[in-house]
Amino acid sequence: MTTYVYGIARGERTELPEGLTGIGDPPLPVRVVTGAGLAAVVSDCPAEGELRPKRRDLLAHQRVLAEAGRRTTVLPMRFGSVSDSDDQVRAVLTEHSGRYEEQFARLEGRVEYNVKAVHHEEAVLHLVLAENAELRTLAEANRAAGGGSYEQRLRFGELVAQAVREQETRDADLVRRTLEPLAEGERPGPESTGWFLNASYLVAEDSDAGSRLLAEAGRLEKEHPHLDVKVHGPLPPYSFVE
C-alpha cells in the first residue's frame, strides 16, 4: 500500500498522541517513518481513487499536523503528498536531509497567514462610477435614451468591467504594500475568479506580527469600504516549504 505523508519533523524521536488518526474512511492510524535524523509523519494512503480533497480529509490532514506541531517543528506537506512506500519515504529523508535541515532553520517558530481580498460588488461599482467621468456620461446618456441600444449597453458593460479590473490591480498593490512590511516573507497563492488577491505571509509565532497583520487588514476595510480582506491563520507554513 502507498504511503501518505503529512509532514517532516526534526529528530527521530518524534512522539505522536496515542491513537492519532488521519485521512480515510474509516480514519487511518498515523505513524512515524525515520531516517537521517528526521521523521516523516505518515499513514497508509486510501485506495486509488478515494484520495480526494474532501472537507473531512482536509481537516484530518491539518489536525495531524497540528498535533505533531505541538511537540516539535514540522515541515507541512500539502494535501495529497503520496509516496510509493515507507522505504521510499525513508530514502527521500536520507537523500534530502541537508535541504530539509535548511528549511527547519528558516521556518522554525514560524507560521503563515493567508490573505484573500475581494470587492463588495455594489460598493466597487459605485466607486468606479464616481471616479470615472466617461462612465458617468455614458450611464446618463443610456438612461436618457431609455436604457440605450444593445450596443451601447454592451460597450458600457465592457468599460465598467475594465474599470473594475484596474481597481482590482490597484487594491491588490495596496494590500501587499500594507501587509508585506509586517512579515518575513510573502508567497502568492493560486489565482481564482473568487478573489483578486491570494497571498500568504510568514511571521514569527511568538511575535505580535500576526495581530498587527489582522489589525491592518481591518483598517484597510474600514478606510476602503469596497474592500473585503479575509485573513486565515495562524496556519502551518505550507506556502513556504520547498
Image (spheres, grey):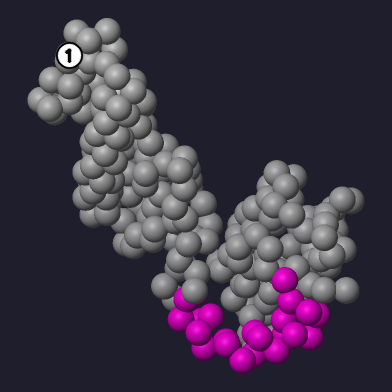
Residue 112 image offset from top left, x and y in percent: 44, 55
Q: Residue at x 46, y 81 (%)?
A: 102
Q: Residue at x 47, y 48 (%)?
A: 192
Residue 20 image offset from top left, x and y in percent: 79, 56
| Residue indicated by mark 1 | 140
Q: Residue at x 72, y 71 (%)?
A: 82
Which quadrant would residue 185 be assigned to in this image? bottom left
The amino acid marked with disc number 1 is Glu
Along the viewing direction, whichever of 18 and 40 lies nearer the viewer: 40
Residue 72 image offset from top left, x and y in percent: 59, 66
The magenta stretch is 82-104
Along the viewing direction, whichever of 106 and 229 lies nearer the viewer: 229
232 in relation to 141, above or below = below
140 in relation to 132, above or below = above
Residue 190 image offset from top left, x and y in percent: 47, 55
Q: Please identify the residue farthest to the left as the structure is shown.
A: 133
Q: Is 96 covered by the magenta stretch?
A: yes
